[in-house]
Image: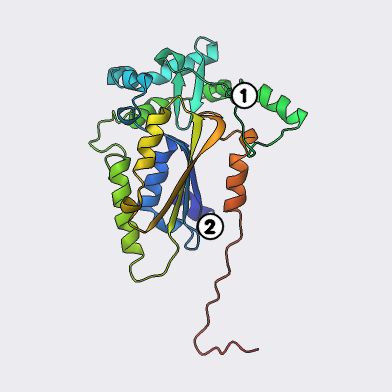
Amino acid sequence: MPALLAHLKIRHVSVACHSGGVVYAMNLIMQHRHLLHPQRPTLDIFAPWVHGSHSGKTAMVLTDLIPRGCISRFHHLVELVNNGVLPVFLFSSGVVVKTFGIDYNPAWETKAESSDCVSLTENERRLEWYMNPELPKYIAAESVRGVSDEVLLLLKRTNHSQPWGLWDDTDDYVSRLAAQETTLRAGKDTPLLKIRTYYAASDNMIGKQGSRWFDGLWTTEACGGVIDFASRTCPGTTHESILDRKSGILNQWAVEVGKPYAVVEQKVEGETGQG
């Protein structure tokens, strides 16, 4: 990521992630904090991944019992999609199949909707109806060998003692991030690191227990006065549909990160400021 941004001559970014992408996003902020804009350092997390040991979801717990050698060949199951043998559904940086007992909830299966919802035109609805079942086919049309590695990563079943980086789990990460922010802000009056988390109303990956566990990590005490954390649950959404256009959540995020930054005037030494 840093190399790509340097090539594109992009100095600062706002970071957002979905599901298992939270592991990558957290590492990016921990190791390359300078990439966040100094005036508005933000991380937006949508339907975060939580390890099965914390979520208690039966499917996740059972998946963790599968021998590592089988999981390392997971991509072969995904490749069967091209032949119509297995139904596969994408989530963040991993893939879930019904073979593992995880049911896919069609977008907007739940009836409760909120004022955040966006009305789609007839053409937009037709396009989504056509594209949704086609996406897995295009995903599986090329090599998906990396899927196995990412499933092992999310389950923390790699050969590394700390597969998620310098931190063991999210609870350890919060304390490390707070310590880092405290050091960065020493003697400076700079904006707080803002972290916003959006939970799905019905999350078949982490459930209510996983959401409560993740939310409980970011207490005022844990954040140490250097992290501004807030969260919300998005009505009518599932783990897979939270970023659908109809939810309106993605629109809100785009508007927020698209707000112009305040112009910081730096007076040149010896300049009076008078024209």
Can you tell which mark lies on residue 70?
Answer: none
**Is residue 231 or residue 186 the one in the foreground?**
231
**Vertical comparison of 184 with 151: above or below:** below
Q: Residue at x 39, y 54 (%)?
A: 32
Count the marks.
Answer: 2
SS of the residue at dot 2?
A: loop
Q: Is residue 242 visible?
A: no
Distance from Cα at disc 1 to Cα at disc 2: 34 Å
Q: Residue furthest right?
A: 122
Can you tell which mark lies on residue 9?
Answer: 2
Q: Residue at x 45, y 32 (%)?
A: 93
Q: Amino acid at mark 2?
A: Lys
**Is residue 74 or residue 110 the one in the foreground?**
110
Q: Amino acid at mark 1?
A: Asn
**Vertical comparison of 25 with 85: above or below:** below
Can you tell which mark lies on residue 132?
Answer: 1
Query: Where's residue 27, x and y in %?
Result: 37, 46
Q: Residue at x 32, y 41 (%)?
A: 170
Q: Residue at x 36, y 58 (%)?
A: 225
Snapshot quadrant of residue 127: top right
**Is residue 41 or residue 200 the one in the foreground?**
200
**30 left or right of 86?**
left
Query: Where's residue 7, x and y in %?
Result: 51, 53
Q: Nearer the viewer, mark 1 or mark 2?
A: 1
**267 left or right of 128?**
left
Query: Where's residue 65, x and y in %?
Result: 28, 18
Query: Where's residue 56, x and y in %?
Result: 33, 25
Q: Neighbour class for label 1 at 10 Å: few (<14), some, many (≥20)? A: few
SS of the residue at dot 1?
A: loop
**111 left or right of 38?**
right
Snapshot quadrant of residue 158: top left
